Amino acid sequence: MFLLKFLQITTPIAAPEVATEDSIRLIDLVMKGGFIMIPIFILSIITVYIFIERYLTIKNATKNSNLLINNIKSSVKTGDIKSAQTSALASNTAIGLVLLKGINKIGQPIKTIEAAMESAGKLQIMSLEKNLGILGIIASIAPMLGFVGTISGVIKIFYNISLADNISIGLIAGGLYEKMVTSAAGLIVGMLAHIAYHYLYILLDNVTHTMESTSLEFIETVSE
């Protein structure tokens, strides 16, 4: 009897097997969002494209601005206007075009040069702002599309219940997937577009400041 009790105590008890489930793949989860995921996906592609394209364009607008203004100032001081024009054109930047406008007006009153450069600066900023409004629109539309998916999922749930005349998790699972996936996707895309929109405008503010300071340096050089 003692031996039997000892064997019962010392014999390890087999741990119950835990059922494992394969985690759902991201693509499968996205597909459960239904047709609303198509426009949301398209908006995400547009957001990424506009952000990258505008980011590179805006960063290029004031590339090597310090070197450029120093070269132009040196040329203007020596009276080599042709060299100053060549430097401005060769830079292939927005700030170079603004300075070129001022160089072409050398010899005219300072007020005229300032006005010409200010107008050129505004045109360049408007050009750099191209398509940024689309990001603002996407930031508003994407969450609304997610909400449309939410409504569609709820409708699907009630429709399935009406057909089966009973409530079970299997009936409502499809609608819940569509409801939650589209809501999450719409919010994520909208948030990314919102961040991209404001970040690019921060870069634009820096470009505007650089243009203003560089133009002021040029005007001071011409005035001397």
Image (spheres, rainbow, N blue to C red):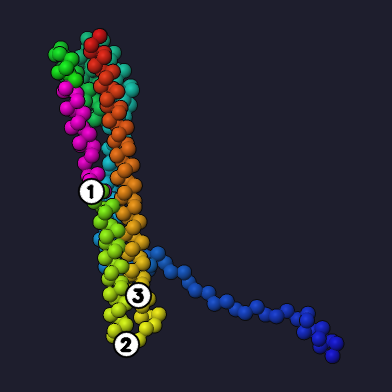
Give the side of residue 202 with respect to residue 18, left or right: left
Indicate the secondary structure of the residue bearing disc 2.
Answer: loop
Residue type, numbered disc 1: Ile
Residue 110, given in percent of the width and then of the height, sits at 18, 15
Q: Position of residue 42 (x, y in %)?
A: 26, 57
Q: List x then y, in percent, for residue 113.
A: 17, 18
Q: Secondary structure at mark 1?
A: helix
Labels 1 & 3 near each other (Cβ < 8 A):
no
Question: Which stretch appears magenta?
Answer: 115-135
Task: Name the quadrant of the C terminus.
Answer: top left
Looking at the image, is mark 2 or mark 3 earlier in the sequence?
Answer: 2
Q: Is residue 3 left or right of residue 14?
A: right
Pick whichever of labels 1 and 3 is earlier in the sequence.
1
Instruction: Pinpoint residue 1: horizontal percent, then vertical percent.
Output: 84, 90
Q: Which residue is mark 3?
A: 174
Q: Is residue 137 left or right of residue 109?
A: right
Give the vertical position of 129 relative to 216 (above or below).
Answer: below
| Label 2, label 1: how far apart the Cα atoms are | 46 Å
Q: Amino acid at mark 2?
A: Asp
Label 2 or label 1, whichever comes before in sequence order: 1
Q: CA distance from mark 1 to mark 3?
A: 33 Å
In front: label 2 or label 3: 2
Is the residue marked by circle 3 packed among few (<14), some (14-19), or many (20+) residues within 10 Å?
Answer: some
Residue drawn at the location 32% of the way across and 46% of the way down: 196
Numbered tag placed on residue 134 in the rendering: 1
The residue positioned 19% from the left and 23% from the top of the image is: 117
Q: Residue furthest bottom?
A: 1
The dot on residue 165 is 2
